[in-house]
Every structure is written in structure tokens, then in C-alpha cells.
Image (cartoon, helix red, strand yellow):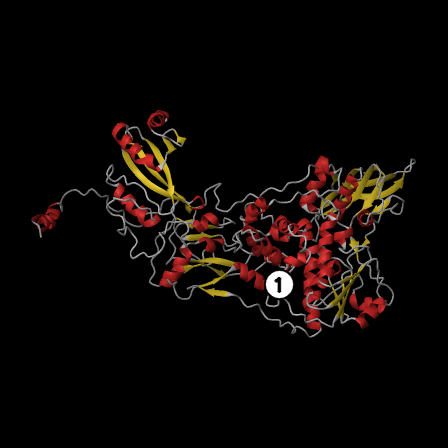
Amino acid sequence: MKTIIDDIRARFSVEWEHEQRADLAQIGVAPGTVVPLLTWMKLHTPFVQLNHLSVVDWLEDGEFQLTYLLTDPHGHRSLMVCTRIPREEATMESVHELWPQAVTYEQEINEMFGIHFPGSPRQGVPFILEGWDDLPPMRRDFDTVAYMHAHHPSRPGREHVDPRVYVGKVFGERGYLHDDD
Amino acid sequence: MSLKNTLAPFSAWMQAFSKPFTVPDEPGVRPGAPRYRGWHINDRETCIGCGTCAEICQNVAIDMVPVDEPTKGDSGLRPKVDYGRCCWCALCVDVCPSGSLAMSNEYVWVDHDGDAFRYTPGVDEKPWDGAELGWRKDEGFDIVDHERVPMGHLDPEERIHTWAEVVVGYTEEEARREAARCVECGLCVAACPAHMHIPDYIAAIRDGDDVRALNVIYDNNSMPEMCGKVCTRRCESVCSIGVNGDPLAIRWLKRYVTERFDDLKSVLDVDVERVGEGRKIAVIGGGPSGITVAYYLAIRGFEVTIHEALPQLGGATFFGIPKYRFPMPSLEKQIKLLEDAGVKIVTNHRVEGDELRRMLEENDAVFIGTGLMKPYRLGAEGEDLPGVVYALDLLRDKNIGREVEVGERVVVVGGGNVAIDAARVSRRLGAEVTIAYRRRIVDMPADDEEIEDAEAEGVEIIPQAIPLRVERTDDGRLDFVWGPAEMVPSDRGRPRPKLIEGVEHHMVVDRVIVAIGQSADHSWMPPDIAEKVADAKGWITVDHNGMTGHRGIFAGGDLVNDTADAISAIADGLRAVEGIQRFLGILPEREETEPEIPVITVR
């Protein structure tokens, strides 16, 4: 893996690298470097296959991390190319012209995280959600439980006893600073 | 329609007799993969009903339902899963603090009744109960943080030369981080004798709202800075995170908040009606129970006077607990809150003779919290020799500022916190210290941390050592003679020590400090009242209002409860706060009904 990373470093600006296993490494690059780098890798290296495109929501940092998993199918090794983009009005250049299957990944990410890939054919077309009118559900600030309560009534007869309240009640928890306790 | 589409069905039929690429299904049901996430299983005995599984479920598929009577450390609730909602993500299994919840690899179940697919694993019997295969939490993986934020301590070498506080205390960042480990199950509330709102103040600390945390804490404890430093912390013993990790540092979190504010009155939001205006209450004994009664009645308009025999309020927390555990400024801050609430404090005043009778006439109620001040005698020959002293006297003298000397070599007899305190104080006074305890170290009633701290400070502990006698040596020192004991089974449960006859060990010391317990002293009461209040052994029994056998006399603290810790005394005080108001007709008499179970109907 060292050789390919050295080759990349000779041509592109790499922010960080991490060798996870002998056959798997990660590198971090700026968003603008991703498409030139991936194009070069597909044309000039054995890492020709886009195996996966995933997203991590770094809510506290205000960023999304996109990870492009490129595989060398004959050498049985993979390189993860990572980049971080601002969470606000998140936009990323599409790679669908390099790998047609990226259309599906980009469509799914568009739906689940709200990241826009201009020019990618199926942006805005529902992937698995039908009639979705809320925050993209894989964003960490999406409140899944509240959504469940709001949209999916429970089976009749369900009752829940909150342990915190129950124990306090049974054992006689009281307050003394306020009359309404 | 294109020609291709028209012919497509026929081209499919052309393949009807070709060898299929698919593998024919085997007859019967194929077993799930070894780690398949199938129907839940739960070990009912290991489960503590903390509800963390229900809390984390993003599909709201789990309800907590009453199954057993709640006990301290087990809510008696168990998770009931609605498979109409469950997505088998296994977050519930991965978060389970007790490790009781798992998933079998069974996945086939047919039933015409939709409601059948809601069941309580481990309670409702299922064919997959006890399944070996299925999803388990990965070894070493946990969503909850099992490691406590460590607490800084002064170095043992350094601390035996100082009376400074041994525990350093959390920084703000450490406190927030430790508070974030709490899953807010509330099991601690049951275990705390005062039923403090523990998850609420921990959540406030986590959220960075220390003012709210302080108000939640003072809502049912008016001596929390003391509890934050020396509480016996029954709460931590039942913490759900503690089942498989370090329990939340509840005591240290309370300490963090209470230490942040100096002027308590300006921070506390008291909103009670002054229903006690014109009523007078006398409190005899200024320990934790008396202080509790005084504060919560004073803020309700009662005219409360505390009568304390010693020069300072605090009871055992003042005269008994060494200042390296509970420094004076902490106590003074809590006393100032009492004064700010309008409590009259009379110190250096031992109530005697007919004074109690007069107090009963002049007050609407009297509360007694005089504690256990009479040390048990050693019961060994030589006990009255000069140099044989009681730990309570030694600690008291040190705490009220008298000159205390223990010489170069000390033996402390006993195994409770008082014995440990006496030993550690003696170390700070420069002595070599040995503790002689009649049972095993594991049987010592003292707090484990106190025992560890004492040993770290160089205190030697000799277990299974029974004092035989004390003799005067030729050079004016004391020969402490003890015999070894063997542990033999006992009808009372824990093994008892039995002296091994014929073996004697000698230890030449300057002081023998006796710390084997203490009893009540009611000699200050008029005998006719004492007879109604206490039994022949001196124990005081109270009713559900905290009232003794004598109308108008309430009691609490070590006199009444058998746990002899400050938080139980505070709980007794809280009971009397309500009890006195009921006695005076301010609050209605309590109805003995089962508590209403707060059920939330899930939408």
C-alpha cells in the first residue's frame, strides 16, 4: 500500500494517511482533489473499481465525511479516499461519469444525508423513501424516535412504565423546596 | 408495444427445462447463522429492569412492564418487545448494562394473532429461551462507558503530614464527562435513603447547568456537600453501569456541584408556603437529622431552635469525621444556609433536667437527634488504664481544637469507619498505627475506599485479632495483648470469630484506641419521658411520621435507624419534616395506599 500512497503523494496533496491492514489503507484529501485523484487512479493504477461510497455525519464539526472505497481486484487490496465537506448546503462533485454505479450511491446519499451531487442523474428522485418530508433521516440531528411517534401509531394496548419514575414513586421520592413537588 | 416485449414471455418459457442456476431449498427450516439476530432472549434474574434497552430503541419497540416487586437495585420491570416495530438492529443488546439481553438465532414464528408478537423475553416462555446461538454483545464492546473518570488524591506520603483534604475533586470537564456516563435509569433513587433525585442532578451536570443541579440536590438534602465528600453512597452500589463496570461517581458529582457555590441562599430557588408561621419547634442535637428538620421547617415559616451540646453544629459529621475528609469551611457553609433560613442555633448547650419538659410546653413539637455518643467498652482487663482511650473522644478532641497526643505507637481496636478515622488521624499525629479487628478484612464495616486509603497511609491491619487485656509496662507504656481467632460458622449468617486458646501476642503501644461502636445516652431526659421514648436498650422506635411513643416528640438519626450513616439521618429528618406538619394538622394524615403506578400509554 505504501507504493500507491507514495505515487499519489507525488501527484496530489494528501492531508493524512493511515494503513489499517496490509491490504487496506485510508488517505484524506481536500474535496477538490477527489475527482482528479479518482480519475488518475482509475486510468493509471490497478485501483479501478469503486466498491462503495459512504458518509459519516460529523455533526459537532459541522462536516460530512465522504469515503470512496477503491479496490484493486487483482491485487486484492483497497484504498479508502476520504474527504470532508461542510455540512451546511452540502455539495460534492459527482463521480458517476467515472463509474456509472456511482449514480445509485449518490442518489441514496442525496436522500439519506441531503448531500447534493450536481449533474448526477437521479438526484431528488426517491431511493427508498416515499413521500419523505422531513430532515434526511441519516443526519444525526434527525430525531428518529420523535418521527416514529409522529408517523407510526403503536399497536393498541401498549403500555410503558418508566423505571426512573416508577422507582421514585414506589420508594416515595419527594421534594421539599417547592410545594408542588 | 415493441416486438421484443411481445416475445419476452415466450423466451422465458424456452428456459423452462434448462438446468436452474439456483440451489433448491432444503426441506424444513434452515437454522439462522450462528450470530443471527433473531427473537430476543433475556435472563430474568440478571436483568435489573433499568430500561436502557427501551430508551435506546429508535423504533420505540420496547416497553418496560411490571413483572416483580421493585427492590433496591432492581426496578422489577422487564422489557417487552413489539415485533411489529423491532428492526432487529440489536442496539438494545449492545447497550444492555447488565448483559442480560441477547438475541437467539431463531427467526421463524407463525401465529395468526398479531398480539402474540409482543412478548416479554425471559418471562413469557418461548422455544428459543436459553438459545446458545444468536447475537451477543461483542467482547470488550460497549456503548455505555464503563470506566469512571478517575479522582485525584493527595499522595499518601504527602497526606500523612497534612490535614488537607485527601480527595482533590473533579474539574468541570471531568465532572461533565463522568456525568455523561449515566443512563438515567433511576435505580439509585430507590437505594438512596433520602431518595435524592440523582439522575436529574447528574443530567443537569452533564448539560452544564450547575445551578439547576444544585437546586435538584437541595430539594431533599440540606447537607449535600457533606454527602458529596463522605456519603456511604448506597446509590453507587446499585448503579446499573456498575453491574459490569465502574458505577457512576455519584458522590463525587454531588461534591463537584456543591463546591461550586459559596452563597447557597442566592442560588436556591425556594418556593414554599410559610405554613408554619407562629409555630415553634425545638431540635435537640445539631447533627444531619436535626439540621434537615430545622432547614426544611424554617423555610416553611416555623420558628426553629437547634440546641447543640458541642461548640459547633454537624453532629458526628463535625466531631467525628476528620477534617481531611470533611473540612470545616464545607460544614460552615451549610450552617450558614440554616442561619439564612432563620434557624436559631444555640451551641455549647446540653439539654438536661426538666428542660425537655419545658421545651414540650413551649414548642409545638420537639425533634431529638442526639446520636450515639456513649462508646462501647472494650470489655477486657486493663481497659481503665491511662492511655486506653475511646476513638469518639479522640476524634472529638481533635476536631474541636484540643491538644491531642497519641505517642509513637498506637493500636486501634475495631473495624468500622470510626476505627479507620482514628487510625488515620493517629498517623497524621505521627504515630505508627495498627488496627486490630476481630473478624476478616472483608467483614470490616468500614468503607472499602477508607480501608484502602488507610493502608496506603501505612496503617497495618491485623484481622482476626481478639483483645485479651491491656497491661502497664515497666517503662510506662501499654502492653496490648491479643489472641488470634478462627472463623467458625454462625447461626446469624456471617462466620463469627472464635478465640484460639493458648496463643497470645503482645504489642507495646502508647495508646489503645477503642472503636467498637457506640450507644445512646438518654440520661439527659426526664426518666418518665425517656421511658416512653426509648426501649430498655436505648433504641428509639418511631412511627411512619417519625414520632416516638411520646406525643409531640419526634426522633431520627443514629438513635433510630440501624445504618448509622448521615444520609439515613437526613432521610429520618425528611420524614419528621412531613410528620411534624401532619401532627400539627398542616398536612393531611398519610393514607396507607399502594403507590399509583405511572403508566405511559405508548402512542
Vertical arrangement, residue B486 with respect to residue B312, above or below: above
| Image location (x, y in percent) of residue B409 | 82, 37
Q: Please tell me which residue is depicted at 7% across the width and 49% down the height of the picture.
A: B3
| Image location (x, y in percent) of residue A85 | 37, 41
| Image location (x, y in percent) of residue B165 | 71, 43
The residue sitting at the left extreme is: B3
Local packing at callout 1 (Cα closer than 10 Å; few below 14, some 14-19, many 20+) is some
Nearer-the-camera pick, B548 or B479:
B548
Secondary structure, mark 1, is: loop
Nearer-the-camera pick, B205 or B448:
B205
Q: Chain of mark 1?
A: A
Nearer-the-camera pick, B495 or B242:
B242
Tell me, yes or no, if residue B146 can be seen here: yes
- Looking at the rendered structure, the kind of residue marked 1 is Gly
Image quadrant containing the C terminus of chain A? bottom right
Vertical arrangement, residue B598 with respect to residue B184, above or below: below
Residue A53 is left or right of residue B181, and the answer is left
Residue A156 is left or right of residue B247, and the answer is left
Vertical arrangement, residue B315 with respect to residue B33, above or below: below
Q: Please tell me which residue is depicted at 72% across the width and 36% down the height of the picture.
A: B158
Say how many tags the image has.
1
Residue B63 quadrant: bottom left
The residue sitting at the right extreme is: B474
Residue B46 is left or right of residue B470, and the answer is left
| Image location (x, y in percent) of residue B538 | 79, 61
Image quadrant containing the N terminus of chain A? top left
Vertical arrangement, residue B304 with respect to residue A76, above or below: below
Tell me, yes or no, if residue B565 can be seen here: no
Nearer-the-camera pick, B459 or B400:
B400
> Label 1 belongs to which residue?
A175
